[in-house]
Image (cartoon, rainbow, N blue to C red):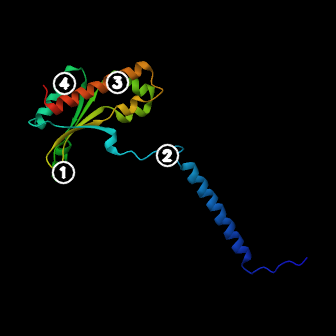
Amino acid sequence: MKQAALHPNAGIVQKLFTACLCALVLIGGNAIAAAPKHAQPPMKIADTVVKLPLAKGVSMDDAVQSMKARANELNMKLVAELPLSKQIVAMGETSRRIEIFQFCDPLTAKKMVEYDLHFAAYLPCRITLVEDAQGQAWLIMMNLDLFLGDPNLTPSLKSSAIQVRDTLNAIIKAGANGEI
């Protein structure tokens, strides 16, 4: 049988073809491996928070005092205050009011971190007072319900987390309504 005459560059073409084929297989395999098993629509950041406007007649200072009073009443520790807008102004920029208040139930925080170290990224719980571009003041905090669906939470730990959520909801509502 007579062998077909090969083009002088046939060896190079075959090697390039093989290399491209291997690359496609690798890229395709990685793309398949990286694809989520159950594609979910992307979550909007607004879907992860509780956001309340300050009621008419409630000043931002009133809201702060109301939150502090309610936290004290409910035995939730205010562990830090971060006057972010004051820092921004000190750096030579203008800023609408932005203040972050960090609240914590230390014993529940300890339990959550012992359960899963990843919870440390969310501690302490924060409520932010922020003024929007139209001058409306808002209180915003993370929606803690997102964590309550963890199927591995023990009943005791879930109960503690619900108590923290309910306390923070009471604090943010008191602030938004100016309840002292």
Q: Residue at x 41, y 28 (%)?
A: 113
Residue of label 4: 70
Mark found first going from the N terminus, 4 or 3: 4
Residue of label 1: 91
Residue of label 3: 162
Depth order, front residue of 113/40: 40
Q: Quadrant of residue 174?
A: top left
Q: Quadrant of residue 97?
A: top left
Name the kind of residue labelled 1 in the image: Met
Depth order, front residue of 60/91: 60
Q: Position of residue 67 (x, y in %)?
A: 18, 29
Name the kind of residue labelled 2 in the image: Ala
Element marked by disc 4: helix
Mark found first going from the N terminus, 1 or 3: 1
Depth order, front residue of 28/53: 53
Judged by depth in the image, the label closer to the viewer, 4 or 3, is: 3
Element marked by disc 3: helix
Q: Quadrant of the N terminus?
A: bottom right
Name the mark on residue 39: 2
Q: Is residue 163 above or below residue 23?
A: above
Q: Residue at x 37, y 36 (%)?
A: 121
Query: Disc 1 and disc 3: Cα gap in Å?
Result: 39 Å
Q: Is residue 32 above or below residue 104?
A: below
Is the C-beta separation of discs 4 and 2 under 8 Å?
Answer: no
Mark found first going from the N terminus, 1 or 4: 4
Asked whether, in this view, residue 172 is left or right of residue 30, the answer is left
Q: Residue at x 56, y 53 (%)?
A: 31
Q: Position of residue 44 (x, y in %)?
A: 35, 46
